[in-house]
Image (cartoon, helix red, strand yellow):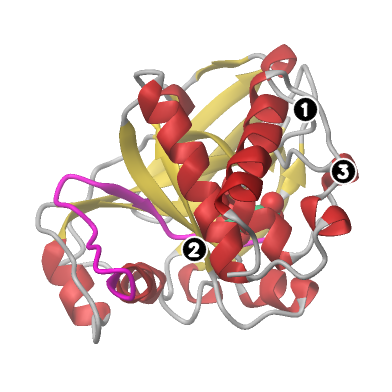
Amino acid sequence: MKLTASQIAELAEYLESAHLERREVVKITDRYPDMDIEDAYAIQNKIKDRKLARGEKIVGLKCGLTSYAKMRQMGVETPIYGFMTDSYVVQDASEIKMSDLIHPKIEPEIAFFLKAPLRGPGCHIGNVLAATDFVMPAIEVIDSRYRDFKFDLISVIADNTSATRFIVGGKATSVKDLDLATLGVVMEKNGRVEMVGAGAAVVGHPATAVAMLANHLAASGEEIPAGSIILSGGITEAIPVQAGDSILLQVQSLGGVSARFV
Ligand code: OOG
Ligand code: MG
């Protein structure tokens, strides 16, 4: 840790008000170039405390930068993790107001619904599949609070990994008869195929991303609670969206999930 408790609290307020007021801000490492990853998660945790104090509830956790494409793009080898509250939930086939957001992008993901807790260290695909009640297609809407959606690893962790909305839909499906690595995904915008991919784009197998999250939490003595929704991380690059855009994600065997930006 390089920052003081009051600097952590100040940066949490800086980023959370940018989120609430829908404005872009200068990335925090410009002001604190020496801050480290531990500081970044401490800021994210303070943002979580602020939301909980306001009455929001944690509904799930997310993995980010889990696709090889995104990791390469960022020059990193470890995923990042964030949280999602009830205010991030968007119902399938409904509208998302652009006026609530800054410069959103969408990502095709797999959502894991856990029936049992997951605790590291040493958590692996097998533990994740055993603890998974079912999976569903998910679209994550990310909306970095940083100017022009540009950041480094430390800044984006502090900004709760750009989390802002997510939509789940399609068929709740048991993982028993699914091969999540070869599962195909097709992301459409306005009736045009924009991105295609397969589950293996996420660290070889989407369940591995969930195992890595459990192992990450274990380092601070935490676990993933039963009943959580976990987003795997985007399978393809993110796609920018604007008012008027209709989006549809179809996942092999799991059906589709959609939304409209207005
Ligand atoms: C960081 C969040 C990345 C994912 O699925 O890879 C993420 C960002 O790119 O803004 O959610
Ligand atoms: Mg994501």
Question: Which tag, 2 or 1, sits closer to the chain's start?
Answer: 1
Q: Which residues are magenta?
A: 218-236
Residue 184's label in the rendered image is 2
Q: How many marks?
A: 3
- Above or below 190: residue 41: below
Whether residue 22 appears in magenta in the rendering, the answer is no
* Mark 1 CB within 8 Å of ligand 1: no
Q: Nearer the viewer, mark 3 or mark 1?
A: 3
Residue at 56 percent of width and 78 percent of height: 78
| Quadrant including the C terminus | top right
Q: Is residue 238 visible?
A: yes
Residue 26's label in the rendered image is 3
Estimate the x, y position of residue 148 in percent, counting from the top left. 90, 43
Q: Is residue 186 visible?
A: no
Residue at 63 percent of width and 33 percent of height: 13
Q: Give the Cα distance between marks 2 and 1.
A: 30 Å
Which residue corresponds to mark 1? 102
> Which residue type does callout 3 highlight?
Val
Estimate the x, y position of residue 182 in percent, counting from the top left. 43, 74
Q: Give the Cα distance between marks 2 and 3.
A: 37 Å
- Secondary structure under tag 2 reads strand
Q: Around disc 3, counting alpha carbons within 10 Å, would you say few (fewer than 14), some (14 to 19), or many (20 or more)?
A: some
Check contact, mark 2 vs mark 1: CB within 8 A: no
Residue at 21 percent of width and 63 percent of height: 175
Question: Which tag, 2 or 3, sits closer to the chain's start?
Answer: 3
Q: Main secondary structure of the magenta part?
A: loop
- Secondary structure under tag 1 reads loop
- Secondary structure under tag 3 reads loop
